Amino acid sequence: MIQQIISHTPVYVWALLAFLIYRGWLASQDRETSLRKVALIPLVMVGLSVTSINGHGPLGDGVWPLWALGAAASAAAIWQFSRREIMVNRAAGTVLQRGSWMPLVLMIAIFVTKYAVAVMSAMHPELQHSVLFAASVALLYGVFNGLFLGRLARYAAALQRQPVAVAGL
């Protein structure tokens, strides 16, 4: 059965997985980059999550506050408990991203969750009417996205706190 599921998975899904693994590997290494590039993966991950949340399911639009609750809670945790110093160069508009495997783990977690939800929904259509299932998925996606967004917010705040260099007279 698993072989059948895998063989029916579109090629673009495997291409997306390869892209996420590549970006996760890049994130494992220190690098200097623009805030725009830092924002790319969090925004892609939010997009993947949001497209998986069903606002027409048993919770209706109630899924969005659950997603926001999960995102706010995990973003606040990242903001509060992250101790790693962020080095920025405001003149160049860059941040030094310290290597971490956390982005790869989060990207794979979102991918696997999205894939598992799709497979489970196809195999058990009754889950699409389950309030508990819809609430769990929305909250989980929110938690994952908040971790990315909290990290991005820390970089943006560090860049804004950095004084702009003044040219000598």
Image (cartoon, rainbow, N blue to C red):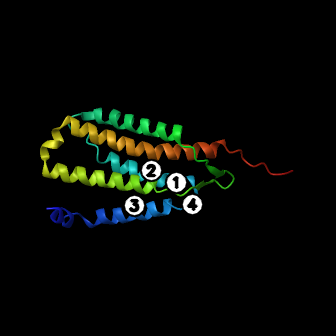
Report whether residue 56 is seen: no
Q: To which residue does mark 2 refer? A: 42
Give the distance between the C-alpha atoms of the residues marked 4 and 1, in whole angstroms.
12 Å
Q: Is residue 159 left or right of residue 111?
A: right
Q: Report the front residue among 13 and 113.
A: 113
Mark found first going from the N terminus, 3 or 1: 3
Q: Which residue is mark 1?
A: 38
**Residue 68 placement: quadrant:** top left
Secondary structure at badge 2 equals helix
Mark pair 3, 1: CA separation: 14 Å
Which amino acid, mark 4?
Asp
Q: CA distance from mark 3 to mark 4?
A: 17 Å
Label 3: how many residues lie within 10 Å, few (<14), some (14-19) or many (20+)? many
Helix, strand, or loop for circle 4? loop
| Amino acid type of the residue that numbered disc 1 sits on in the rendered structure | Val
Image quadrant holding the N terminus, namely bottom left
Quote the CA–CA distance across marks 4 and 2.
Answer: 18 Å
